[in-house]
Image (cartoon, rainbow, N blue to C red):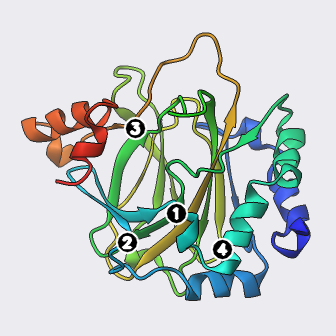
Amino acid sequence: MNTKSFIKIEKFKKALNKFNLIKPFPFTIIDNFLNIKLAKKIEKNFPLHSDKKLWTYKNYCEIKKATDNWNMFPPEAYQLLSVLNSHDFLNIIKKKIKLKNLYPDYGLNGGGFHIMGEKGKLNPHLDYIIHPKLNLMRKFNLIIFFNTKWNSSNGGELCLYEKNPNNKNLPGKLVKRIEPKFNRAVLFDTSLNSWHGVNEVKSMIRKSMAVYYLIDKKPKIERRYKALYSPLKNQMKDKNVKKFIKMRANPKFAFKVAKI
């Protein structure tokens, strides 16, 4: 497949020019990322929020539905995900950001389609570092939004936070809110103290696609195999929330407590 027929490559390359210089951690926003006809087809054929085949996350820190099942992706989304995991596309990132190696995750662990209805949210969190099956290190997250007519009153912003100098288990100051506008893509480095979350969705259905990219494991890194969540301000004194966060970060219990 021709990558240029799916993605506006030159725009993407330009967006990566100063990627490594961005604070609080490297990220870039690319509007009109996909061929417009492709983006509209993918949005039209997104699974319904009510689809019972979707995995449901409903707990203190995450309210969303998702699937990484390739058989649930309509043709256009299947093809796009194939392109985003292709050698050609990864090579663009690798060359622009000057990496020796970069690997796809064909299994879409943590990726695929993500759907949030009203009150959907993700508390600030750090992604897992070590891939549970490939034993590689998660490096980048690419998110594409498929929400026409989205505006600030709908909520659902992707939020980026500074590192907290006093507590490694909590985010620092909120420094960037990114609206999930139609055909907007965001690429960011998840391998640092990359605290991020999603503000509560006020109305409409928030639809996104996520892909993760991996690198070789470094000798001295934190062995985090599951996401580490932070309580919101109104949850700071809640013992149940604190207990949940501890269990959610433990590979032995994470799956069991994701839906409560």
Q: Is residue 22 above or below residue 113?
A: above
Q: Vertically, is 134 above or below 122?
A: above
Which residue type carries mark 2? Lys
Q: In front: mark 4 or mark 2? A: 2
Q: CA distance from mark 4 to mark 2?
A: 17 Å
Sequence-wise first label, 4 or 3:
4
What amino acid is labelled 3 in the image?
Ala
Residue 52: x and y in percent read 32, 75
**Numbered badge on residue 69:** 1
Q: CA distance from mark 1 to mark 2?
A: 10 Å
What crowding class fits label 3: few (fewer than 14 Cα within 10 Å), some (14-19), or many (20 or more)? some
- Looking at the image, which residue sits at the far front? 71
Going from N to C along the chain, the mark reached first, 4 or 2, is 2
Are the residues at dot 1 and dot 2 in contact (C-beta closer than 8 Å)?
yes
Q: Nearer the viewer, residue 242 or 150?
A: 242
Q: Position of residue 29 (x, y in %)?
A: 68, 59
- Asked if residue 218 can be seen in this view, the reply is yes
Q: Which residue is mark 3?
A: 227
**Residue at the location (56% across, 70% down)?**
71
What residue would you read off at disc 4? 77
Between discs 3 and 1, the one toward the N terminus = 1
Element marked by disc 4: helix
Pick the residue in front: 29 or 223: 223
